[in-house]
Amino acid sequence: MVYISSWDEFAERSIQLFRADPHSTRYVMKYKHSDGKLVLKVTDNRECLKFKTDQAQDAKKMEKLNNIFFTLMVRGPDADIEASGKEQAETQPTKKGRGRKQ
Amino acid sequence: MGFCCFRVTELVLLQPDPFLNELTAMYGRSTENGSVWVTFKRSSMKSKAKRNKLGADALEFRCLVRATDGKKTISTLISAKDQQKFQSSYATVLKAHMHALKKRERKDKKKAAEVNKKEEKAPKKSRSSTKVTA
């Protein structure tokens, strides 16, 4: 399986994959501290999307994706992920649009 | 000798808070070597046969969160009521342990200056935001 290099593509396609088959899609996050590597995987056992990184900034993006998947998996594939994104933006207004902040 | 011996790791189902504690411990144990996997899945915790019998409408789906370090597996179920709390606590646990990732390396001078500026601003902002949340 080839890793997807663009985060936006990975995020978008993984959400699509989940929505297409919510009952067999899983989202896996693997973290190896000794190598400082983070691998994200979304699969429905037919298609597999993977994203690999060693950058701290991607962990922030992952946090957002985590929240999207929590919303989708708890509330169902039709849940409004835009709304949960907004909620987050309201509670943490300073973080919006500042991917570089540590 | 028809049986094959797999080492079956028991899936321990925990409440969300003990799960997070155990996850924290797992991350703590795997700093020198080893990885930690965390999986999210939408699940009704029913077998396929039962799912077909009951029909999709009768099932209650929640988010199953599993974590393993290869030796031990733990899991928890997140319902709509727990979601907000769990997702923020989970994010806190990750933030506390994922510090082996690289902070922006490819800084040319311009970018470095920008980053420094933002970092100067950052503490003030984060303080004000903690005030709001506190």
Image: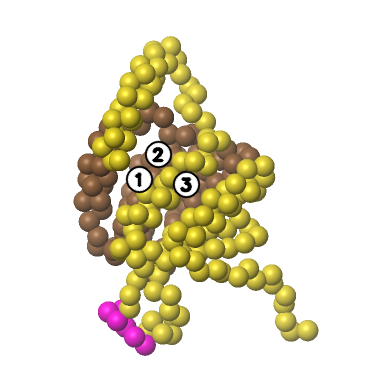
Is residue B37 shown above or below A8? below
The chain painted brown is A
The answer for which chain carries disc 1 is A
Residues shaded magenta: B53-58
Say if labels 1 and 3 share a chain: no
**Quadrant of the frame with the C terminus of chain A:** top left
Seen from the viewer's position, the closer of residues B127 and B35 is B127
Seen from the viewer's position, the closer of residues A37 and A1 is A37
Q: Nearer the viewer, mark 3 or mark 2?
A: 3
Q: Residue at x 30, y 63 (%)?
A: B81
Residue B62 x, y percent position in the rendering: 36, 68
Answer with left or right where residue B57 lies relative to residue B64.
left
Q: Colour of chain B?
A: yellow
Main secondary structure type of the part rendered in magenta: helix
Label pair 2/1, CB-CB below 8 angstroms: yes
Is residue A98 shown above or below B49? above
Answer with left or right where residue A23 lies relative to residue B14.
left
Q: Residue at x 32, y 24 (%)?
A: B124
Asked which secondary structure carries label 3, the reply is helix
Instruction: State the mark number for residue B93.
Output: 3
Q: CA distance from mark 3 to mark 2?
A: 13 Å
Furthest residue toward bottom: B53
Say if labels 3 and 2 share a chain: no
Residue A42 x, y percent position in the rendering: 44, 55
Instruction: State the mark number for residue A60.
Output: 2
Residue denoted by label 1 = A64
Query: Identity of the amino acid at label 1?
Result: Lys
Q: CA distance from mark 1 to mark 3?
A: 15 Å
The answer for which chain carries disc 2 is A
Query: Identity of the amino acid at label 2?
Result: Lys
